[in-house]
Image (cartoon, rainbow, N blue to C red):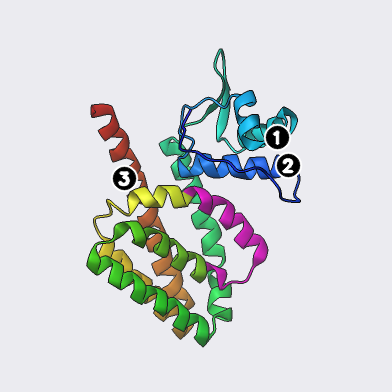
Amino acid sequence: MNSAVSFQPMLESRPIRDIAYEVLKHGIISGEIPAGERIVETVYAARLHISRTPLREALRKLERDGLIEYVARRGVVVRAFHLEDVNEIYTIRNALEMLTLPAIIEKATPEDIASLRVKLHGMDALMRKGDIEALSPLTRAFHWQLTSLCRQQRILRAIEGQDEFITRFSAIAIRQEKHLWEAHQEHYQLVDYVEKRDLEGFRQLMQKHIEDSKRNCLEAVRERREGLKQE
């Protein structure tokens, strides 16, 4: 078992099964609990300071999410992400994001535009320094802030559910993206379209931008898998 993972006693007021689910889900998506690791009930119940009953309920939810699976003679095992999973997650996320565009154009304020540009300037500085480690979360934050301008809470909750996975994938992809500066310039253009209330221009560029992101991620994950096979 990965000894780097650290769990704290659960003192929140939410149901214990929900807290256990969130803790384990975060550990799996972040890679702290790696693919192939066994989730031994007695061990994880002790580490989470809970009984095995809420842990089992959390594991059932994780199985429905496709994050764990029950393997004969091994028990509960963390499931590896396959290219098909990455493709499906991006497809769902991108389709949801496209639904938000008319509302973003309608509801964005001058203050929203200014705030987005502040983030872009921060990204400029990180790109000049080559600080990719810091650039990845800031890029995700920019996209989330832009999407959130739609203020459509149900769609945003659905997008947020997919973003947990995409955060992990995009951290891999951004290090290998061959057209990083081009993608960054598109961020500026997207904000310009929002400011001009140009829905058609915004829609066309966003479609290209998120499909490029999906393709780059799939290529990066594929290259990483091939590299691991050759080691």
Residue 92 appearing in the image: no
Main SS type for the magenta part? helix
Q: Which residue is mark 2?
A: 16
Sequence-wise first label, 1 or 3: 1
**Residue 106: percent from left, percent from top:** 57, 80
Compared with 197, 171 (above or below) is above
Mark 2: which amino acid? Ile
Q: CA distance from mark 1 to mark 3?
A: 38 Å
Mark 3: which amino acid? Ala
Report helix, strand or loop for mark 2: helix
Residue mark closest to the camera, 1 vs 3: 1
**Residue 92: percent from left, percent from top:** 53, 50
Quadrant location of the C terminus?
top left
Q: Which residue is mark 1?
A: 50
Question: Does the magenta segment cover residue 143?
Answer: no
Sequence-wise first label, 2 or 3: 2
The residue nearer to you, when weighing 17 against 183, is 17
Question: Which residue: 49% across, 82% down?
Answer: 197
Compared with 92, 204 (above or below) is below
Return the mark for residue 220.
Answer: 3
Sequence-wise first label, 1 or 2: 2
**Which region is colored magenta?**
147-165
Left or right: 124 with respect to 69? left
Work out which residue is located at the far bottom of the displayed protein and give it: 110
Residue mark closest to the camera, 2 vs 3: 2
Quarter holding residue 67: top right
Compared with 69, 27 (above or below) is below
